[in-house]
Image: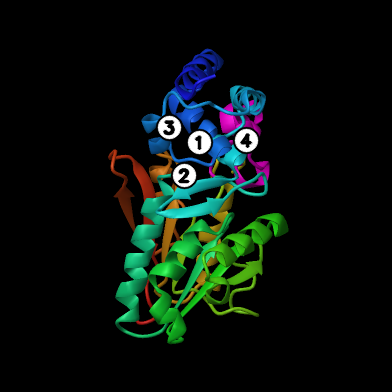
């Protein structure tokens, strides 16, 4: 079957199955199978689609809801190629904003002195890797300490593989931890925190629709209101973070007001909207000791 026809047939199957992006999914999966970029497929529509049975099998798995990122084994995110499998949540486009605003704050603080930054709930390690690459000079100079923690040993293993892929293994300290548990003990207290913690309500996770049926529940389930992990992290800030810490938290688009109410006493809170104008990132600054 020609590439053009294979894509049309697969797109029709995925459209019936309810994929929101049936043609894109078909193109990405066929390109993955052929070892080609989408641009090559566009330029060679009459070429043989090769192993039709293997392609059909991938399409059926996608039709059943399995994410394209798991089928391909990677996700293109923030200019990086991040390994993905069922050990961790797939990096989302909105999390690029989280990485950007945290990096900007770290750069600002580095002008005044050394900085300790924590990526809490690192998952695939995508955010920590983006920070390590952008701030490589500060890490080499010993001015930036970058810690990436997760309660899941499987996720940490995947983060380690991704760090190795991007040449930043020695730049990130991977720590098995429940949120900030080692901070102030065996690990330095963070000046900057970046966290994309589970914020989906348990009832929604229970429905297991779309990718939620394949991604690890541990990385999704935020409890009855979706805020259990965020609540615990904010409760820990005064005791486990450095004075004057800045915490950048990704939230659901409709959770900003609820998370703002959980901020520690005396904290200032700012909402950072995404490109669509949705409230995706909250910045929470605790006062310094002098304040």
Find the distance from the CA under tag 3 to the CA under tag 4.
Answer: 41 Å
Q: Is residue 207 visible?
A: yes
Of labels 1 and 2, the one closer to you: 1
The residue pinned by badge 1 equals 31
Find the distance from the CA under tag 1 to the CA under tag 3.
Answer: 7 Å
The residue pinned by badge 4 equals 202
| Foreground pick, 60 / 291 | 60
Asked if the residues shown at circle 1 and circle 3 are in contact, with their CB atoms under 8 angstroms apart, the answer is yes
Q: Position of residue 196 (x, y in %)?
A: 50, 52
Q: Vertical placement of 100 versus 189: above or below?
A: above
Q: Secondary structure at mark 3?
A: helix
Instruction: Kindly identify the residue that appears in the image at 44 percent across and 62 percent down.
Output: 130
Of labels 3 and 4, the one closer to you: 3
The residue pinned by badge 2 equals 92
Find the distance from the CA under tag 2 to the CA under tag 4.
Answer: 20 Å
Task: Compare marks 1 and 2 and give the one earlier in the sequence.
Answer: 1
Of labels 2 and 4, the one closer to you: 2
**Side (left or right) of 218 relative to 264:** right
Q: Residues within 10 Å of mark 1 (few under 14, many from 20)?
A: many
Find the distance from the CA under tag 2 to the CA under tag 3.
Answer: 25 Å
Find the distance from the CA under tag 1 to the CA under tag 4.
Answer: 36 Å
Task: Compare marks 3 and 4 and give the one earlier in the sequence.
Answer: 3
Task: Compare marks 1 and 4 and give the one earlier in the sequence.
Answer: 1
The residue pinned by badge 3 equals 41
Q: Residues within 10 Å of mark 4 (few under 14, many from 20)?
A: some
Q: Which residues are magenta?
A: 199-220
Q: Residues within 10 Å of mark 2 (few under 14, many from 20)?
A: few
Q: Position of residue 95 (x, y in %)?
A: 43, 50
């Amino acid at each position: 079957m020609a590439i053009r026809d294979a894509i049309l047939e697969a797109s029709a199957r995925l459209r019936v199955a309810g994929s929101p992006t049936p043609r894109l999914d078909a193109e990405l999966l066929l390109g993955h199978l052929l070892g080609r970029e989408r641009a090559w497929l566009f330029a060679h529509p009459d070429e043989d689609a090769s192993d039709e049975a293997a392609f059909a099998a991938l399409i059926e798995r996608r039709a059943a809801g399995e994410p394209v990122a798991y089928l391909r084994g990677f996700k293109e995110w923030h200019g990086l190629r991040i390994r993905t499998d069922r050990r961790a949540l797939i990096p989302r486009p909105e999390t690029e904003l989280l990485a950007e605003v945290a990096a900007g704050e770290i750069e600002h603080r580095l002008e005044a002195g050394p900085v300790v930054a924590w990526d809490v709930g690192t998952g695939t390690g995508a955010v920590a890797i983006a920070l390590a690459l952008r701030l490589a000079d500060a890490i080499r100079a010993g001015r930036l300490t970058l810690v990436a923690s997760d309660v899941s040993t499987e996720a940490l293993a995947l983060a380690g593989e991704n760090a190795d892929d991007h040449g930043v293994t020695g730049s990130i300290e991977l720590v098995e931890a429940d949120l900030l548990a080692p901070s102030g003990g065996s690990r330095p207290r963070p000046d900057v925190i970046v966290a994309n913690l589970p914020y989906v309500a348990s009832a929604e996770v229970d429905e297991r629709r779309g990718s939620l049926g394949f991604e690890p529940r541990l990385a999704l389930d935020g409890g009855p209101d979706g805020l259990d992990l965020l609540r615990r992290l904010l409760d820990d800030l005064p005791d486990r973070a450095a004075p004057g810490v800045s915490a950048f938290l990704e939230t659901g688009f409709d959770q900003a007001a609820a998370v703002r109410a959980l901020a520690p006493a005396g904290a200032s809170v700012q909402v950072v909207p995404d490109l669509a104008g949705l409230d995706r990132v909250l910045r929470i600054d605790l006062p310094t000791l002098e304040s």
